[in-house]
Amino acid sequence: MPMSRPAFKWAIAAAAVVVLVLLIWRGTRPAPVGVTLQEVHRGTVERTVANTRAGTVKACRRAKLSPSVGGQIAVLPIHKGDQVKTGQLLLELWNDDLKAQALLAEREVTAARSRSDAACLKAEVAQRSADRLVRLRQKDVVTEDRTENAVAEAAAMGAECQARRTEVRVLEAKVAVAQASLARTRLTAPFDGVIAEINGELFEFVTPSPIGIPTPPSVDIIDNSCFYVAAPIDEVDAAGIRVDMPARITMDAFKDRHFQGRIRRIADYVLDIEKQARTVEVEVAFGNDADRKFLLAGYSADIEVILAVRNDVVRVPTEALTEGQTAYVFKDGRLTARTVKAGLSNWQWTEVIEGLAPGELVVLNVDAPGLRDGVSAVRREATP
């Protein structure tokens, strides 16, 4: 039976109302929240502390050398970048006068030794003669006066021998003094290393640094066989650090590379510098000798001290947890808020003891507008 005209009008009106309601509902319904997701999985989590300001790569030994006396540079056999050995001459001031004095003192020692040898030989002869006369006197062959004179002369000759030997020792001390004065005009390498800086040229004059007025060193030498990183750690974090703990080192010069190291020293005092947080200086030695060829003293570096490690645990990116330790789980287009019990944590990963399971998807951008329990969400790709 055909629909009457009024019924047809009512059907069209009803359909229009339904369409209008649907349009209103779609227009007022909140749009799905765009979320970046990460799958929960098992892995390693470490608890670490890092430096508050950039640290510095330093050589284990570095010497900034200057002569202890002033004078004119007469010998300068080195150049920047030269590799030198322990005891090698680096710089020598004009010292002909001191060399002459040292030579004179050595010649005086030679002469004094000759005099000492002569006096001691005479003393030996005199002593043998006196001993013979003493034996003859016992047999009443010689007079007592002659015997006594011979004994006294032998004693005097012995004293002269000792005096000459003492004179030799005095003159040898004078030689040592002259050699010490000569050594003050020379700089020698205290260890094997590389020449980092030279302040001076041949025939220039150098003067010792006045008290309270530092001057550049004549020669700066670096031991390039050993390096470490010195970096400040916040006083709050420093209490948990111990010598020989493992650490990771990163440097701007090697952006994608990590160097292994160990804590070699923790400062015995807190640095209290105006307008800066109080820190404790920590030194980290490089653990691999092969890394030495990549290093230069002065590189900026950061350290990450590993305080504790958990292996094969459930973990999520730290950014996926709110301050209240809540994570948002994505499933079938909706979000569910989960309270998480966290374990070890660092800036990258957080151990999950309870609340999440491997394979679940959690939201990384927890600061997204409109993010809350039960809302619909749509997955979006992470921003590179």
Image: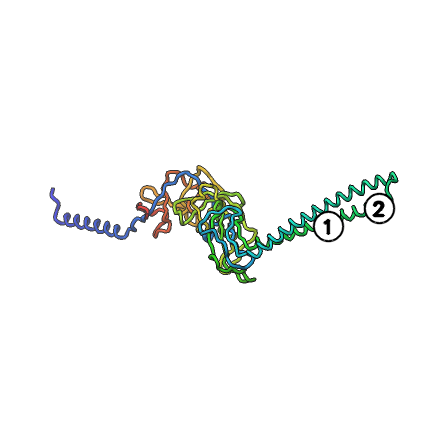
Q: Residue 200 appears at what percent x and percent y?
A: 47, 57
Residue occupying the point 78% across, 41% down: 128
Residue occupying the point 50% across, 60% down: 205
> At numbered mark 1, what does the secondary structure look like: helix, strand or loop?
helix
Which of pointers 1 and 2 indicates the residue nearer the eye? Answer: 2
Colouring scheme, one of rainbow, by chain, secondary structure, one colour: rainbow
Q: Quadrant of the N terminus?
A: top left
Residue occupying the point 69% across, 49% down: 115
- Disc 1 residue type? Ala
Please tell me which residue lies in front, 366 or 205. Answer: 205
Q: Residue furthest right?
A: 140
Circle 1 sits on which residue?
Answer: 163
Pick whichever of labels 1 and 2 is earlier in the sequence: 2
Circle 2 sits on which residue?
Answer: 148
Please tell me which residue lies in front, 328 or 127. Answer: 127
Q: How many circles with numbers are drawn on the protein?
A: 2
Res 88 visible: yes
Q: Residue 203 appears at what percent x and percent y?
A: 48, 58
